[in-house]
Image (cartoon, grey):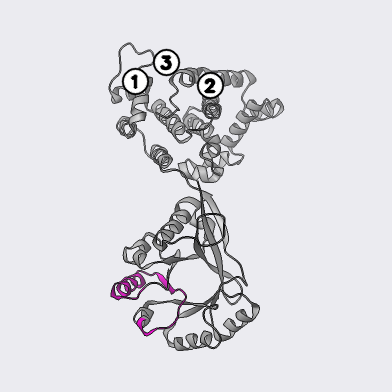
Amino acid sequence: MNVFVARQPIFDKHNNVVSYELLFRNSEENRYSYDDGNRATYQVISNSYSVIGIEKITMGKRAFINFTSDNIKNGLTYMLHNKDIVIEILESVEPDDEIIMACSLLKEKGYTIALDDFVYDPKYDKLLEFVDIIKVDFIKTKGIERKEIVNRFTSKNIKFLAEKVETRDEYKEALEYGYTYYQGYFFSKPVIISGQSIPVSKIFYLDMIKEIHQKNMNVETLEKMIKKEVSISYKFLKLINSPFYCFKSKVSSMKQAIVLLGEVEVTKWLYITILGAVSAGKSEELIQMSIVRAKFAENITKSINLDKISLDAYLMGMFSTVDVLLDQPMKDALDAIYIKEDIKKAILGENNFFGKLLKLIISYEKGNWEEVYEISSELNIDKKTLADSYIKSFDDIVYLLSENKYYNKK
């Protein structure tokens, strides 16, 4: 599902971008079309931080984000780091005692506070004690009023931002009156930035991948992991009792099954099962390619006595198609699952050992034999070892792919 945020730059008097205002959008149409300010703020924060990535949007600069009265009172502001944002209080917010107390606490915790579309009224006097920036709408505020509002607060160490500046004359006027920051169509219209969100059901499985990868797996932790999801438990016990393993007696205990298979094998099985869950709806050929690559990479490393990194090689092969499976750019997809840095770099194209191994595997798939021989020679892998490893990768998974279908949804 595509999500959207609009970003409009804020400049200083030297025409340097110092911040961005983030604006709610629910399509590629560059205008606000929503009647729920509370929800709009939630969506801007969620889309910016959880989907697109705040660093990608602001490039390390502060983000001005609009907050309603409810947003401020319910503590939504504290979800965000005080160095990342400017809390922009909308003109619709009534400066009652609760708002003033909330802003006092925000100032104590180091947050920067701005007032949006400010028009002076005595009711704002208490609130202004905690305000750092006043935004003046140059469409609503005309002529000498633009200067008077600056003069009124010169003793309060408040900075002024001229917004909706649309002409060079307005910009020159703002400079002359002592405004510090500038924003508007004269400089730049809001730009739509979009990203793809991952459905909640998939996020659950992606979190499991992170957990598996970050923990030192043993029988107890693996048992807890498998029991987290009913369909995974079912598939695991079905697999362990299938003809693929041919155990003499039925296995009904999860712990016994893990001991029989071994921790490494169970970990690999979990990765594949979860990968199948997050890739529901994709072609079986694509999932098969991921698993074959994983087994091929594992078999190659074992054949050249690199057993210690065989699991890493397996994961590299498995996640080499994760961008297609998650419908995300490769870097974003890899960030979502969290894998070792050298594996991530290899999948993204770096020419380290794993990168060369992946390139070898893909060249072998495509029948690009000149490149296959060149890389295999560099990695000191003979032709027969390579061919045997590839054939074995199919032998190892043929039952799982054709009969058990454990990569399908429950």
Q: Residue at x 54, y 53 (%)?
A: 194
From the image, tell me which residue sits under label 2. 393
Marker disc for residue 153? none
The mark that comes first in sequence, 1 or 3, is 3
> Does dot 3 land on a helix, a strand or a loop?
loop
Q: In the rendering, at what x and y percent does residue 381 appear?
A: 61, 24
Nearer to me, 194 or 10: 194
Seen from this angle, which residue lies furthest top? 248
From the image, tell me which residue sits under label 1. 260
From the image, tell me which residue sits under label 3. 244
Label 2 environment density (alpha carbons within 10 Å; few <14, some 14–19, many ≥20) = many
The mark that comes first in sequence, 2 or 3, is 3
Label 3 environment density (alpha carbons within 10 Å; few <14, some 14–19, many ≥20) = some
**Quadrant of res 138:** bottom right
Marks 2/3 in contact by CB < 8 Å: the verdict is: no
Residue 79 visible in the displayed image: yes
Residue 338 visible in the displayed image: no
What amino acid is labelled 1 in the image? Leu
Q: Is residue 65 above or below residue 399?
A: below
Quadrant into which the C terminus falls: top left
Region of the chain picked out in magenta, as a range: 94-123
